[in-house]
Amino acid sequence: MERYGWDARVNSWGRFLAAREGNVPDAMQMIQDHESWKESTFPIDLSTVVLQDILKLKAVSEVDVAKEDLPPTVYVNYAKLQTLEADHSPDDVVKAFVIFTEIMLATARDPRHPKASQLIDLSGVSITSGFRVDILKKIYATFEPNYPETLSKMVMYPVSKVVASTSSMLLSFVNDSTQKKFVITDSIEKVCEELGWDQKEVEACGGVTEFVSKHEKAGDSLISS
């Protein structure tokens, strides 16, 4: 999988500068580190057995049913992701996340300012005892330095109000600017509002997970027969 033109240097510099709050030397170092990351990461070989396993399980997929003024969503089924961690390298899980992020940003409505949202579906995951925050850390460690200013919203659902109130401690590794884009909720109404989904359809499907199953673009074209 090759890099797409959405990340051309002429388009990307402004994002890196904004991510480092206008500090030119820091932004230059960030983009240099990013270039090194690109050279070591791409092209991604989609034919590897472990990556094919991840794609077939549909732990990560695309949901493009947003309103015109809202970006599409990278969907992450966290329960499946945690299952994968037992048998696959964390790097392979991150690669799957990168693949879908790349595809969605490459087809963004405005290629100069590409945006995508992320939905972390925590259905069936106990965030107080069963939540593997280390997986989220690995994803963040790749996303934050290499995809600056491309995140519209990260929605984590369902999370109780009590746990959501302590989320700053749980997500202490996330910088303040990115934390402002996080929506941690147990409300379907809030999920639909942030991602531009039809709440009535989501409820008719039986919930968020079922709605995604109906509308996901799980990358069938990426899966070898």
Image (spheres, helix red, strand yellow):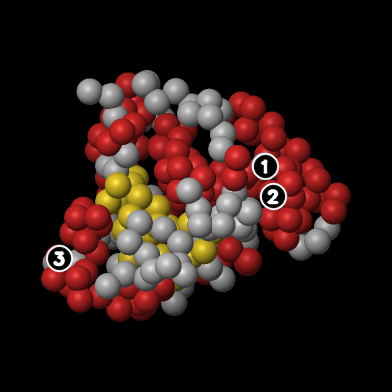
* Label 1 Cα crowd, 10 Å radius (few <14 / some 14-19 / many 20+): few
| Res 93 label | none
Q: Residue at x 24, y 64 (%)?
A: 208
Q: Position of residue 154 (x, y in %)?
A: 46, 62
Q: Position of residue 30 (x, y in %)?
A: 74, 45
Q: Amino acid at mark 1?
A: Ala
Does any portion of residue 135 appear in the rendered image?
A: yes
Q: Residue at x 51, y 45 (%)?
A: 106
Does any portion of residue 160 appear in the rendered image?
A: no
Q: Nearer the viewer, mark 3 or mark 1?
A: 1
> Residue 201 sits in which quadrant?
bottom left
Q: Nearer the viewer, mark 2 or mark 3?
A: 2
> Residue 212 sits in which quadrant?
bottom left
Q: Are marks 2 and 1 in contact (CB under 8 Å)?
A: yes
Q: Amino acid at mark 2?
A: Asn
Q: Residue at x 83, y 58 (%)?
A: 23
| Mark 2 element type | helix
* Label 2 Cα crowd, 10 Å radius (few <14 / some 14-19 / many 20+): some
Disc 1 designates what residue? 8
Q: Amino acid at mark 3?
A: Cys
| Res 205 label | 3
Disc 2 designates what residue? 11
Distance from Cα at disc 3 to Cα at disc 1: 40 Å
Q: Earlier in the sequence, mark 2 or mark 3?
A: 2
* Label 3 Cα crowd, 10 Å radius (few <14 / some 14-19 / many 20+): some
Distance from Cα at disc 2 to Cα at disc 1: 5 Å
Q: Position of residue 210 (x, y in %)?
A: 18, 59
